[in-house]
Image: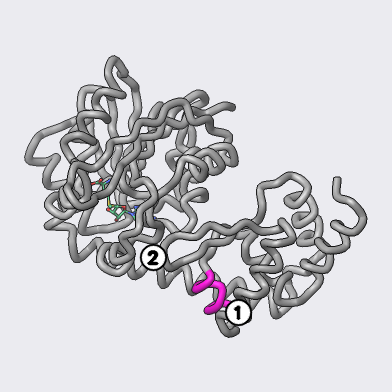
């Protein structure tokens, strides 16, 4: 419950056209200042000023990552209810809002295209590129250790790339499905499994945003070094959760927050690592509970990337 003055401040923050447009855009997921500037076609200082007012009022939360800042609607209950109520009063057919949605879709398509171009370029060489990232053998040993004694019917590896996780965890599942949106990655993975003759493994071209055909089918779904390629990892996690049987588990393996800005340009990273707090919030929003988290520190002198393995269990 907000006090009178505080409530008026919140209403003032929301009561302006650009800020309402921003709230409406952020209702579709987390976005960076850069994206919002492009969508609204206004100067960055102007958009930043509006975002600052929204953040100060508690309607929006900000997360800084290197040179980028990401914004999302606040998770705080009062703010979330108020924003939802305000947005419900807006006419979605308003031409300004419709144009915003079209530009948002164009921005997302552009991100996807850039990532797809990168992955199609590196597909043949991916197993070498991925080993540059982190203490690969330590990470893989920890993944296997955390899966010790686990044997499931169905394992899904989202963003499977060359299918390394299906190879590594063979023996822990009766059926394994690797899904990836890059034709090149899928073709490398497919020929690898054809050669090895692993009959319980299938790889499929598919998008994490469209997993209907895999609904409620997996005991374990994995996202290994995938979420940092998403502008809104929380949304990807929500999509991944759809694949789980009741009580199933998502295993996320990804980087902890870091400052290696060049990875955005050179390796199509959208997020500079994921923090425990973020994971907690995304998990909660997807009705998942963080049931385990293990950090594997880098072993490179002069700095490297720490990897974390999170287990998120379905609470439905
Ligand atoms: C960094 S690679 C990781 C590959 C593999 N999991 C590994 O660790 O070797 C990220 C993979 O996610 C895939 N990917 C990115 N966006 C995707 C999406 N929306 N749907 C499915 N796969 C996606 C890319 O094509 C790429 O193969």
Residue at the left extreme, as displayed: 195
Residue at which label 1 appears: 40
At 17% from the left and 47% from the top, the residue drawn is 300
At 19% from the left and 66% from the top, the residue drawn is 121
Q: Quadrant of the N terminus?
A: top right
* Drawn side of residue 159 relative to residue 89, left or right: left
Question: In the image shown, does 194 or 32 lie closer to the viewer?
Answer: 32
Question: In the image shown, does 158 or 269 lie closer to the viewer?
Answer: 269
Which residues are the magenta region?
33-40
Residue at the front extreme, as displayed: 302
Q: Say if mark 2 contacts mark 1, CB within 8 Å.
A: no
Residue at which label 2 appears: 112
Residue 58 falls in image quadrant:
bottom right
**Which circle, 2 or 1, is nearer the viewer?**
1
* Drawn side of residue 311 relative to residue 56, left or right: left
Q: Cβ(mark 2) to ligand 1 < 8 Å?
A: yes
Q: Main secondary structure of the magenta part?
A: helix
* Drawn side of residue 183 relative to residue 279, left or right: left
């Amino acid at each position: 419950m907000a006090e009178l003055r505080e409530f008026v401040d919140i209403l003032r923050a929301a009561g302006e056209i650009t800020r309402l447009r921003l709230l409406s855009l952020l209702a579709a997921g987390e976005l960076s200042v850069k994206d919002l500037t492009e969508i609204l076609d206004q100067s960055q200082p102007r958009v930043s000023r509006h975002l600052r007012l929204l953040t100060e009022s508690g309607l929006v939360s900000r997360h800084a990552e290197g040179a980028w800042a990401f914004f999302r609607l606040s998770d705080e209950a009062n703010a979330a209810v108020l924003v939802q109520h305000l947005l419900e009063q807006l006419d979605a057919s308003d031409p300004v809002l419709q144009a915003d949605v079209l530009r948002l879709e164009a921005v997302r398509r552009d991100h996807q295209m850039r990532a797809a171009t990168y992955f199609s370029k590196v597909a043949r060489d991916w197993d070498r590129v991925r080993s540059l990232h982190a203490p690969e053998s330590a990470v893989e040993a920890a993944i296997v250790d955390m899966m010790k004694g686990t044997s499931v019917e169905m394992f899904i590896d989202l963003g499977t790339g060359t299918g390394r996780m299906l190879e590594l965890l063979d023996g822990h599942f009766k059926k394994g499905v690797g899904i990836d949106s890059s034709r090149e990655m899928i073709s490398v993975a497919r020929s690898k499994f054809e050669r090895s003759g692993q009959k319980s493994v299938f790889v499929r071209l598919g998008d994490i945003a469209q997993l209907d055909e895999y609904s409620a089918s997996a005991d374990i779904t994995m996202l290994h070094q995938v979420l940092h390629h998403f502008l809104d990892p929380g949304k990807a996690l929500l999509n991944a959760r759809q694949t789980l049987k009741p009580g199933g588990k998502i295993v996320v393996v990804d980087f902890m927050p870091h400052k290696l800005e060049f990875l955005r340009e050179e390796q199509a990273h959208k997020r500079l690592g994921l923090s425990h707090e973020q994971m907690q919030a995304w998990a909660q929003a997807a009705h998942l509970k963080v049931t385990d988290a293990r950090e594997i520190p880098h072993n490179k002198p002069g700095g490297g990337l720490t990897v974390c393995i999170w287990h998120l269990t379905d609470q439905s």
